[in-house]
Every structure is written in structure tokens, then in C-alpha cells.
Image: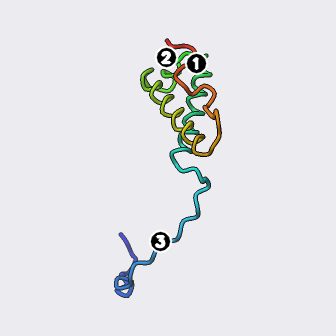
Amino acid sequence: MDTRSFNSEEARMPPTEPPSLPPLPWKEGIELVLARYEHRILEHAMAQAGGVKRRAATLLGISRYALERRLTRVARTLQEAAGAQGTPNAEPERASTTMAGEG
């Protein structure tokens, strides 16, 4: 049982503003940060699978088709970010769908 007493004075007080949040630790935006993180996960799975996409997908608990889509999306996001920053040839090393081990 709750033993706190009800204070009618508190009930009439206007709600206070939430504390201001500190600035985000990155400037690129959440999509780019998540794409970089996902790229690292996909690359790690590909390395563990010896470059075989079907095995990497199994390790990740997704279909090979889903792995292909993720690789393509991540590569596109990273390329667009590199282009926006003026960095030529900034494609991630193995994030494209042309990785070894198609089957």
C-alpha cells in the first residue's frame, strides 16, 4: 500500500519542462551512425563465414536475400554520406553485393 500523502499544492502546479538533453555525440546523423555500425556487424559475419554469404546470413539469423538487401542499403548510405562530404571513392571495402561466396 502506498503511504505517501497527496499534496493538493503539487496537483495545482504547472508541469515543469523536461531537462534539456546534451547534444548528440555525432554530427552525421543517426542514419549514418547506424549504417556504420551495421556495416561492422555484416563485415564481421562475412569474415566469420569465410566470405560465404549464405553462411553469414545463417550466423546473423536472416535470409541470404535479407543479407544482400542490407549490404546494398548500407553501401548506398555510406556512399551517399561520402559524396555529401566530398570524399571521392569512399565505398566501404566489402559492403557491396559483389562479395565472394555467393552461395
For label 3, the crowd category at 10 Å Cα-Cα, with few meaning under 14, some 14 to 19 and many 20 or more, is: few
| Callout 1 secondary element | loop
Does label 3 or label 1 sit earlier along the sequence?
A: 3
Residue hosting label 2: 54
Question: Residue 83 is drawn in which quadrant?
Answer: top right
Q: Amino acid at mark 1?
A: Ala
Residue 18: mark in rendering: 3
Answer yes or no: do the residues labelled 2 and 1 have beta carbons within 8 Å?
yes
Does label 3 or label 2 sit earlier along the sequence?
A: 3
Q: Residue at x 49, y 16 (%)?
A: 54
| Callout 3 secondary element | loop
Marks 2/1: CA–CA distance? 8 Å
Q: Residue at x 57, y 32 (%)?
A: 41
Q: Amino acid at mark 2?
A: Arg
**Residue 76, percent from left and from top:** 51, 34
Quarter of the image for the N terminus: give it.
Answer: bottom left
Residue 22: mark in rendering: none
92 and 23: which one is in front? 92
